[in-house]
Image (cartoon, coloured by chain):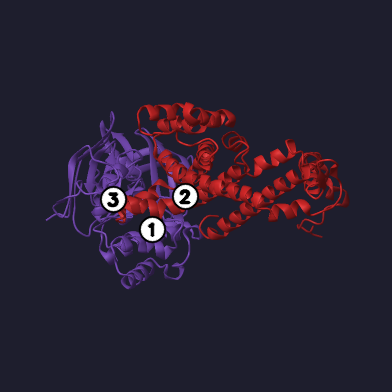
Chain colours: A purple, B red
Amino acid sequence: MPFLVLDKLTKRFGEHLAVDALSLTVEQGEFVSLLGPSGCGKTTTLQMIAGFVEATSGSATLEGRDLLAMKPAQRGLGLVFQSYALFPHMTAAQNVAFGLEMRGVARAERAARVAEALALVGLANLADRYPRRMSGGQQQRVALARALVIKPRILLLDEPLSNLDAKLREEMQIELRQIQRTVGTTTILVTHDQAEAMALSDRVVVMNAGRVEQVARPHEAYERPATPFVATFLGKTNRLNVNGTEVSVRPERIRFSGDPSALAGKVVARIFQGNHWLYQVDTEAGRVTVIRQNSGDGVPGEGEDVRLAW
Amino acid sequence: MVADPRPGPLPRETEYRPWLLSAPALALFAAIVVVPLAMTVALSFHDFSTMGGIKPVFILKNWHDLFTDEYFREMFGRTVRIALWVTAICIVVGAPEAYILSRMSARWRGIFLFVILGPLLISVVARTLGWALLFGGATGVVNQALMKLHVIARPLPFMFTETGMVVALAHVLVPFMVLSVWAALQRLDPQVENAALSLGAPHWTVLRRVVLPQAMPGVLSGAILVFSLAASAFATPAIIGGRRLKVASTLAYDEFLNTLNWPLGAAVAVLLLAGLVVVVLGANRWVEKRYAGVFE
């Protein structure tokens, strides 16, 4: 039996259709990302699952039970918010303990589970610290521990890493993935960051203007985008008009070629980005973006004539 | 040689410059606050007799009277009692009002904020006289209506009662509590309530365990504000209480303008001021200590 089933879930705000008949099945233990630009309806979808936004129509069932009929407090889902939403007047341990208290877990067991959850996110030594005295990354971990400690049926993550700086975000991605693997909680992540979605998820749900564009494994969605929107949203792509037909080619798939029949062009810009070079090449098929590994070999400079193949 | 990047001591001539620049403000402050206050304090130690008037001597008679005479103890007791009741009512009415306000949509919030703050635009005297018109003895509008409807047999006592003073003062001062709590609630992340709900907390628990503790600094600073305004209020106690039911401020007024015993009036005023300063500073210190780790 499928774990979470969303069937034609729809949300309308007045005239505006925020989520348009979204259908999705999530298996137990799966990590699914709702990915799309801001305003695509991904957060609204998450809030309907959580129960903070009422669905206009459609249904959501969790293990066969109607989710939409339950109050947020009864759904037993763990949430991590973009702002972390920690209780500022409680210490890290009190924050984590809150959900257990609400479930009437006895004091001794509560303390043990709080310690376990804080250890899981690597914060065992900061149990008595108030959120204001913690860094963004630490607050993020407390929020994660608070959501996981209640053993939620689904973990819902709303842009959890977007307030962190790039380096920390990368570290947290790896850690989040490991933690999710360890506890095996079914997880739904909402993000606008395609790299984050691809790095973390088993499947991505690419959304645009309230509709699902594609549901696929990250690699598959990247290699075989179902729609032009997915192709441009997941990474960079070149839309080239070659011999009357439009083709979509990823920048890293294009190489410089000695073949005289290959597409001719002139390098207009060359940007060094550490591990790779980024080129802009003008051709008769339009401007082409090319990414080449920085392999240490000689590379064409600006103004040079090149030929492109893929 | 590399120049020392650390700032050295200021040259002699610039050291007094900040003082020079703030001198006009300091002079004004000294002239209109410090000097009159010092003179009032000095006045409270002078002697007074009906025949001889004020004698500029140093005696403790006024202060001795204030602390020993049952009459004055009653006045100050009433002042504190009324201020405490007003504060309590303002908390009970104003804090929930502020929470409801913070949850309203922007349009309704604008309207209701105006409704709450509107009374501040009307003079305290006019508002207090309004209460007098509604409840003033047998001719009060509400009293008449209730008697006609046979809800009550006699007019509700309001004028010249402590209850009347408390009600009228609470009405005048509740906007200060609303604003103070509202300012605290503004800093609250709306997602925090959702977080508590998702963790299984019922609405009432969310209010008690999550919203209220975060609104507490606002409630406490509002309480300090309301308490000091209620204890030092003059117009409302003067109109509702008249000369029959005096509080510290109306007592000081009477001593100054009716009995002409300025030294005693000064002693009353100074004691009221000193009492309020102690209460406000003490409460402030307590709030800051209590919430130091949480709100900074």
Quarter of the figure that contains the N terminus of chain B: bottom right
Q: Is residue A256 visible?
A: no
Q: Amino acid at mark 2?
A: Ala
Pointer 2: what residue? B215
Q: Position of residue A54 (x, y in %)?
A: 25, 41
Is A267 left, or right, of B73 in this rendering? left
Crowding at mark 3 (Cα within 10 Å: few <14, some 14-19, many 20+): many
Image point (36%, 64%), residue name = A97
For the residues labelled 2 and 3, the Cα–Cα distance comes to 36 Å
Image point (28%, 28%), residue name = A15
For the residues labelled 3 and 1, the Cα–Cα distance comes to 19 Å
Query: What kind of element bears circle 2?
Result: helix
Image point (40%, 53%), residue name = B210
Chain under callout 1: A
Q: Is residue B13 visible?
A: yes
Give the label on residue A143, or none. 1
Q: Amino acid at mark 3?
A: Ser
Pointer 3: what residue? A33
